[in-house]
Image (cartoon, rainbow, N blue to C red):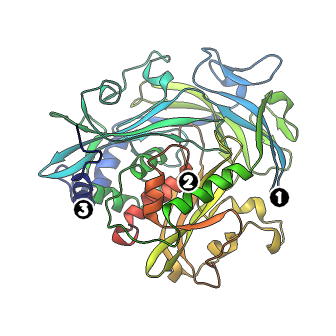
Amino acid sequence: MREREDAGLPARLALSAATTDGAHLRTAEFDDWLAGRGRAHRFRVERVPFAALDGWSFEDGTGNLVHRSGRFFSVEGLRVTTGSGPHRLWHQPIIKQPEVGILGILAKEFDGVLHFLMQAKMEPGNPNLLQLSPTVQATRSNYTKVHRGADVKYLEYFTRPGRGRVLADVLQSEHGSWFHRKSNRNVIVEALGDVPPADDFCWLTLGQLGELLHRDLTVNMDARTVLSCLPDHGRPAGALHSDTEVLSWFTGERSRHDVHAERIPLAGVPGWVRGPETIAREDGRYFRVVAVSVEADSREVPRWTQPLIEPVAPGVTAFVARRIHGVLHLLAHARVEGGFLDTVELGPTVQYTPANYAHLAPADRPPFLDLVLNADPRQVRYEAVHSEEGGRFLNAVGRTLVVEADAAQAPLDPPPGYRWVTPGQLRSLVRHGHYLNVQARTLLACLGAMGDEGR
């Protein structure tokens, strides 16, 4: 018989979070290290017309954008109907990628402190190309080498039992607005034995990662979602609503929404027009599908072409926060997105591209959006610019914030679909798949970077 929980892990994680210089790389040396990894490789990303895509084509009949191998992913159409909300019917392109990828971070103790093996990884959609990623960030098509490229380094720690001790392991959703029912395995494994860091890899403590999460465009989305799955290592606090009440409310939200998402041919998506270089909405809003040619000699395949989704403008993702009886609470939103496996997942208070709503009167704009956009700088507890997954999305960047509000701005009795929860309650929920969306998980990782206040 074994203990159901590792009683010593929270203290080990807390020590790592409090350690802001690592045994292998000092935080002050990180910028030079990352710049050096950039100079060590050749990177190039160029927009190309769809006709220049190698191995990709528009399928006869459906018009779906597919790869000749039948693997990787496809761009198809989606028709979504809902029983409530301001938008009850819409059509859009969406990425269909049925395989489950691995987002894995390797951990190891040095000088009594847990460190995490991070990779300087180039992704074609990143504005600055090179960001800090998990140890392993690979789709099944990649790590089974459909592309006939090089092996994925350290993959064996996440696919072969016995190579380490699992600290966290959960299937989590990807972007429900751009992926159809896509999941990735988010896993952290503590290695047994020596693990020399290969080129482009470095060992960092949680404290160092917390400092880097305060920097723009440094820690990529995949690293943020995996870090959010770490067990809670703060002191438990009371909450406005009990855990059972929060679960009951969330179950009710899932039950009351009637969402039907049906895949349709890309050629039959109304309101969208395919040109030589883009698939875009007639009114120019939301996003477009584009194509790129890529060179990256640090990747398993040094050259390739692929489609990407490109938002038309930067986004804003934010938790509105309040101190309730001295305890930090966050206003979570039960969001409907067409690509979710279930009807809703918990998202941040605000998750929008403001430009898409600029034409609306204030009364018709999404709740709390203007509160976040117009927040007094003294209310902002966290802010950084982060990008979304650069392997599928081009220049998908946005401000990520925690904005502390007062009772007049954010009442204890919020609008339907919103509920006050503590960071600890969210960390309890993130241990289960498809409860928190990827934007909420990013903010949960960023809350950890706020130190004790965020815990």
Horizontal and vertical percent position of residue 188 = 34, 41
Type of amino acid at the residue the image marks with label 1: Pro
Choose top left, top right, bottom left or bottom right for residue 162. Answer: top left
Q: Which of marks 2 and 1 is nearer the N terminus?
A: 1
Q: Residue 252 carries which label?
A: none
Horizontal and vertical percent position of residue 355 = 73, 61
What is the quadrant of the C terminus in the image? bottom left
Tell me if mark 3 has few (under 14), some (14-19) or many (20+) residues whose alpha carbon lies within 10 angstroms of its own.
some
Q: How far apart are marks 3 and 2 (CA)?
A: 26 Å
Type of amino acid at the residue the image marks with label 2: Gln
156 relative to 349, above or below: above
**Tag 3 near tag 2, CB within 8 Å:** no
Q: Which of 102 and 313 is in front in this view?
A: 102
Q: In this view, does 218 lie to the left or right of 395?
A: left
Choose top left, top right, bottom left or bottom right for residue 57. Answer: top right
Question: Label 1, on which residue?
Answer: 86
Q: Nearer the viewer, residue 371 or 313?
A: 371
Q: What element carries label 2?
A: helix
Q: How far apart are marks 3 and 1 (CA)?
A: 46 Å
Horizontal and vertical percent position of residue 403 = 54, 74
Residue 189 seen in the current view: yes
**Tag 3 near tag 1, CB within 8 Å:** no
Type of amino acid at the residue the image marks with label 3: Thr
Q: Residue 20 carries which label?
A: 3
Horizontal and vertical percent position of residue 104 = 38, 37
Q: In this view, does 233 lie to the left or right of 433?
A: left
Q: Earlier in the sequence, mark 3 or mark 1?
A: 3
Q: Residue 439 carries which label?
A: 2
What is the quadrant of the N terminus in the image? top left
